[in-house]
């Protein structure tokens, strides 16, 4: 279980967390920081158990109201799908962890961001994003049936961009 995340010593706020079905027992969580420090910073994840991997994503968010909606799902199958409420000015980010290393294909209007297979622990992690105008349905097609944990969050986007980090962690 993740108990905290800091960027440059500044604590991040937990947005949402999802644990998959007991057979798989993996946690996926998203964290936010409204005003991160500039420059290269250390990201420190504190857990009560082992960490199998981590991925970071950065988008420009409105620091006054970062997160609009989040949702999560878990199960066994080949077509995980999770939906959040969103608007045309937002960005949607998701993360999926699977119990095996099937091929992963993101759904319609999603931009594939990260894909990591960890064969030694039979785990695969992938992330994608989507413009809010596309509706907030985040789905994946898995090459074979697998246990999964899936988390989705919509963010208010601002212009000009200010660097803000979202950390998605799985164990």
Image (cartoon, rainbow, N blue to C red):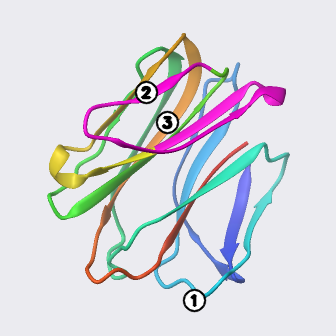
Q: Which residue is mark 3?
A: 150
User: In terms of image quadrants, where is residue 115?
Assistant: top right
User: In terms of image quadrants, where is residue 156?
Assistant: bottom left
* Label drawn at residue 38: 1
Q: Nearer the viewer, mark 3 or mark 2?
A: 2
Lower sequence index among marks 3 and 2: 2
- Mark 2 falls on what kind of element? strand
Q: For this view, does 26 lie left or right of residue 127?
A: right
C-beta proximity under 8 Å, tags 3 and 1: no
Quick check: is 123 in the magenta stretch?
A: yes
Q: Nearer the viewer, mark 3 or mark 1?
A: 1
Q: Residues within 10 Å of mark 1 (few under 14, many from 20)?
A: few
Percent x, y for residue 47?
79, 56
Disc 3 versus disc 2: distance between alpha carbons? 14 Å
Q: Residue at x 32, y 78 (%)?
A: 62
Q: Mostly what secondary structure, the magenta segment?
A: strand
Q: Which residue is mark 2?
A: 105
Disc 1 versus disc 2: distance between alpha carbons? 34 Å
Quick check: is 97 in the magenta stretch?
A: no
* Label drawn at residue 169: none
Which residue extends farthest top?
Answer: 144
Q: For this view, does 134 lie left or right of residue 65?
A: left
Q: Residues within 10 Å of mark 2 (few under 14, many from 20)?
A: some
Percent x, y for residue 56?
59, 59
Lower sequence index among marks 3 and 1: 1
The magenta span reads: 102-127
Which residue extends farthest bottom?
Answer: 38
Which one is nearer the viewer's eye here, 56 or 147?
56
Q: For this view, does 80 lie left or right of residue 87?
A: right
């Amino acid at each position: 279980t993740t108990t905290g995340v800091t960027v440059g010593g500044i604590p991040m706020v937990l947005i949402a967390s999802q644990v998959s079905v007991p057979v798989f027992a993996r946690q996926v969580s998203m964290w936010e920081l409204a005003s991160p420090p500039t420059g290269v910073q250390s990201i420190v994840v504190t857990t009560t158990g082992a960490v199998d991997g981590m991925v970071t994503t950065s988008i420009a968010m409105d620091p006054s109201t970062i997160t609009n909606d989040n949702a999560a799902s878990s199960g066994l199958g080949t077509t995980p799908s999770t939906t959040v409420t969103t608007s045309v000015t937002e960005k949607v980010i998701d993360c999926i962890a699977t119990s095996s290393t099937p091929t992963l294909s993101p759904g319609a209007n999603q931009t594939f961001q990260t894909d990591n297979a960890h064969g030694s622990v039979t785990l695969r992690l992938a992330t994608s994003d989507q413009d809010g105008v596309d509706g907030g349905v985040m789905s994946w097609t898995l090459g074979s049936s697998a246990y999964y944990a899936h988390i989705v969050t919509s963010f208010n986007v601002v212009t000009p961009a200010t660097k803000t980090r979202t950390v998605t962690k799985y164990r």
